[in-house]
Image (cartoon, rainbow, N blue to C red):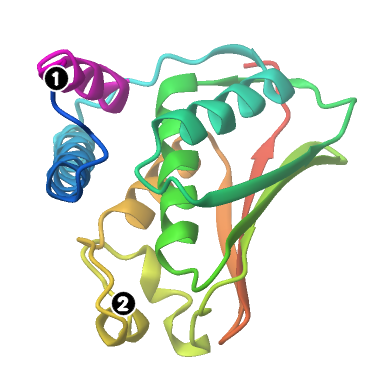
Amino acid sequence: MLRYRRRTDLSSCHHPHIDQDVPEVSYISYDIDRLIQLVGNILNFSNIEAGKKVYKKEETDIAIWLKETINNYKRESIENDINIQFQLDNDLPALYIDKDTMAQSIFNLLDNAAKFSHGDKEVEVTAERNNNSIIIRIKDKGIGIQNDEKDKIFEKFYRGESAVEYYIKGTGLGLALVKYTIEAHDGHIEVESEPGWSTVFIITLPVSDK
């Protein structure tokens, strides 16, 4: 995954005697990580719009994959103070997915939850089977989304009023890329929100042979 590779490349360039806890160094590291994320999203969009995006789908144990993805996010995240709780059904079936691309979608949603949370950054992730689908929910306790913006937030480059009001950095690419990825897996994503209280993104993926 681009995010993992680039972070590793840059980390290997860090001088061993530089204290990463020094505020100035921390700010630089934060900006580098944001730049990496931006470049990754732009490259993914370029490939999608050029028709060059290839999804390498393989049979995947969703429970194991999702746990690994969340743990990787906790380890790699620039949002160090995020608290993620997850609860997964024990009988989740395997799905055919592009693990790296789908993991980046989960990363984007967790990043989004962290950025739009105030105070304690608490996020709940659940996964369950519902008939012939697997439903993944990512819920935060943040500032919420206005009703008239729920459809717009998945548009490329769209940034909501809350992002501007609270000076939250972003490009408006993350959620649009998530939507593209989910739909490429024959699924769909929707959002439910209570302005001022919480937002939950709901991913529905069909259970199929391939």
| Mark number displayed over residue 163 | 2
Q: Residue at x 42, y 58 (%)?
A: 112
Which amino acid type is shown beneath numbered disc 2?
Ala
Magenta includes 125? no
Residue 93 quadrant: top right
| Image quadrant containing the C terminus | top right
Left or right: where 210 falls relative to 110: right
Residue 102 appears in the picture as rendered: no
Which residue matches tag 1?
A: 17
Is residue 127 shown above or below 9?
below
Q: Residue at x 69, y 36 (%)?
A: 206
Which amino acid type is shown beneath numbered disc 1?
His
Q: Tell me where residue 113 appears, x and y as whole percent.
A: 49, 59
Please tell me how many numbered marks the rendered image carries: 2
Q: Tell me where residue 166 appears, x and y as whole percent.
A: 31, 82
Q: Main secondary structure of the magenta part?
A: helix
Q: Residue at x 20, y 61 (%)?
A: 171
| Mark number displayed over residue 203 | none
| Image quadrant containing the N terminus | top left
Is residue 124 shown above or below 99?
below
Q: Tell me where residue 81 appears, x and y as whole percent.
A: 49, 51
Q: Which residues are magenta?
A: 1-16
Magenta includes 6? yes
